[in-house]
Each structure stands twice: as C-alpha cells, then as structure tokens.
Amino acid sequence: MGEMELPDGALYGASTQRAVLNFPVSGQPLPAAFIHALALVKGACAAANADLGRLDPDRAALIQQAAREIAEGRHDAQFPVDAFQTGSGTSTNMNANEVIANLCSLAAGKPVGAKDPVHPNDHVNLGQSSNDVFPSTLHVAVAIALRDRLEPALAALQAALAAKAQSWQEIVKIGRTHLMDATPLTVGQEFSGYAAQVDKGLARIRRAGRALHELAIGGTAVGTGLNTHPDFARRVCARLEAQTGIAFREAANHFEAQAARDDCVEAAGMLATVAGSLAKIAHDIRMLGSGPRAGLGELVLPATQPGSSIMPGKVNPVMSEMLVQAALYTQGLCQTVVSAGRDGHFELNVTLPLIARCLLDGISILANATRVFATRCVQGLQVDVRRCGELVDRSLMLVTALNPRIGYDKAAAVAKKAYAEGRTLREVVLELGLLSREEADAALDPSRMLGPTGT
C-alpha cells in the first residue's frame, strides 16, 4: 500500500501507523491490561509453534522475550491504535506483531523495520489470525482482570461488612419495608445481608471467569483451523494456564467461539448484577446515615471531606455517591456488551475491541470504587445506638407481635389509636384491657422479635 512515515522512536510499523491515521476517534487505545494479555498469547503461540517444529528455537526465543517485555508493561506507549477500530481487532493484532518483530530485530543487532530475523506475519503471527487471536486475548485479559482486580476488592468489602455485622449483633433497630416502618431487627442482621450480597457477588464473578476459559485460538480465519497445526491450540492453552494459573482450554466448537460472543455477554450479566448489588448497599448506607438531625441518622458515616461550598460543617455521603456512580457506569458498559454480542454476523463478531474496552473498563472502575468504599466508608462506620433505640421505641410496627395474642384486627385498631392520639402501643393495650402489664411488656419487647417465634 505504499510507504508510510513513522514517528521517531516507534517500534511499530506501517500497518499500525495506518490504523492510527484511520481511527482518530476517542484518543484512547485499548486498555493496557488487554495489550499485556495479547503479549501472553503471542508468547504462548511462539512456544507452541517451536514445540511443533514449525518455528526454529532461536526465533521462538526472541519472540517470547519480546512478548515478556510487553506483558510486563515496558512498551505500552508502542500501542497507540484507538479502541474504536476494525471490529476484528486486526489493527491491534498487527500492532503487536510489528512491535514484537522489531524488538526481535533490535535484540539481534538489526534495525527497526528489518523484519530480520523475525517477520511480523510469517513468524509472530504463525498459525494465527486476528479472528482467533483477538477473542482469545479478550478472554484471557478479562479472566485475569476479574480474578486479580475485582475479586480482591469484593473480598475486602465482604470482610469489612461481615466484621460490622458481627460487632453489631446486639444493637436493635427498626426495620423498613416500602420505605415504611416494619418489625425490628439488629444492625448486625441488616449488615449480614449486605455481606451475603457481596459474597454472592464473589461467586458470580468466579462463574464469569469460568465462562471465559474456552479460547478461540486455533480456529484461524473462520474456525476451520486453516494454516495451523491440529495440536497448536491445545499447546497454546496449556502454556497460558501455566503462566496465569487459569485453566484455559481450546474451544469445543471453533465456529461458535469466533462467530459469537455469548460468553462475554454472560460475563457482562454477572458484572452488571454485582454492580447492582453494590449500588443497593451504597444507597442503604447513605440513607441510614442521613441527617445528622433531620434524617434517619442510625449510622454515622466517616467524614472524608467538606460537603458544601456554602454550608459550613456539612458532610455528605460522598463515598456512597461515588460507588453508585461507578456501578451505574459499569452497568451501562455491560449493556453495551449485551448489544455488541448481537453483532456476530456469519463467522465473526465485529465488535471485539468495543467488548474488550467495556469489560476491562467496567472491571477496573468497579474494582477501584469497591476497594475505596470498603476502606474509606465501611471500615469507619459507626452506629448511633441512642437514635436506633429511639426509633424502635416510637415505632408502631411492634404491634405485629400482638397478632398471636389479640388477633390482627384488634392489633390494627391498637396501632391506629396509638398513632392518632400520639401514644405508645403499650399505653393503648393497657387502657383497652387487652393484656396485663406483664403480658404487654413481654409481647412488645423488641429483643424478642428478632427471630422465629411460632411454635
């Protein structure tokens, strides 16, 4: 296609530069995590080709060394292609092929662009196509990010919530359903629900990772495996498992593995579910800490920064607000992945770079937000015990415990009378002679309402 001028210091070649000029869209390349995973795949391919006698050991060693340097993040600036590019990711695949080949040339004492001793297509891309390399890299990158970024963040939040649940088991508060007063529970019980939500989220993220274990590598252009060795994919997957500790395996059906991205859509669904859980928890904590005098005020949130430029002394629930925004953004990215999953026309999905960007960005943002929320909000939470007790004492929903003793209709009448007259349930029950003092005290004791009472 003719000559192409390259920037000084570029380790990539003409294919990459054409892509840079063709796609000046977002100004943002694919996430570094994707490039690092791509280098892992390229190194594993070189090793597999050497094992199969298709690539001489010296060239394979040079390619593997160059790939290691890229995987370690030493050449991130050499991957400038915009995330919005050719739908197969061919531009980024060729970017990697060219950088690796030029690193090999430099290691062999040859100039950049020599394609000697390693050629970007003939050697680095041997037995591969962008159509199987890119989806394979997508799975590798996302599986690693889920395990190494999001899982630890969720585990830290779950531990922080579980610790609060344990320490607050004896503090009774009023429950709320439909945003209205309900029967009592303990703050510990409430927080045990949050901890369980995050624990289920961890399980979902692990299932999402397992959905990505199948790799498309070995299918080459359309899934037939043209120009590659029959044992190539198995050996690549084994190399990747040894390097990452993740049980990658060859796709059971290469045509599905390249034409469809249902596995990524599944992972996006799990990620969106976790984001929803985190937003619910953040919302609850924000509202339970509302006040300090005109709100619920049951929780005392850590004061992380001034909350207003005009109201002195105001402190806002900024950490909850941050996590909610991160969750909403992640859910939007996941919805984009769902839509992109529809674009598997015939033998190839052509939204691969978009899926990669959305999943990796969502995982990164949600992981960072979760980690910060755990350390700067949950760990510093306190309970206003006096306020919790005050709201329990004033609640009319303690009347629920009277149902087995005086029946639903009489209990409802007691609640209505107490509310209308601004009196306590105990006062009304005694006035109407429905229970003795001892019976009323026992029935309306909130500490006896924290678990099953039927016989």
Image (cartoon, rainbow, N blue to C red):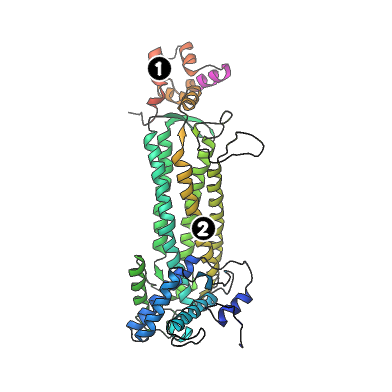
Image position of 371 with respect to 62: above or below: above
Q: Position of residue 422 (x, y in %)?
A: 56, 17
Identify the residue under disc 1.
441
* Between marks 1 and 2 in the image, the one whose residue lies nearer the viewer: 2
Graded by Cα atoms within 10 Å as few (under 14), some (14 to 19) or many (20 or more), the crowding at tag 1 reads few
| The quadrant where residue 137 appears | bottom left
Q: Nearer the viewer, residue 174 or 443?
A: 174
Q: Position of residue 157 (x, y in %)?
A: 43, 47
Q: Quadrant of the C terminus?
A: top left
What residue sits 56% from the left and 72% below the top? 80
What residue sits 56% from the left and 61% below the top? 336
Residue 113 is covered by the magenta coloring: no
Q: Nearer the viewer, residue 284 or 265?
A: 284
Q: Secondary structure at mark 2?
A: helix
Say whether residue 300 is visible: yes
The residue lying furthest to the front in this view is 109
Identify the residue under disc 2.
362
Q: Position of residue 76 (x, y in %)?
A: 50, 69
Image position of 19 with respect to 390: above or below: below
Q: Position of residue 446 (x, y in %)?
A: 41, 25
Span shown in magenta: 412-421
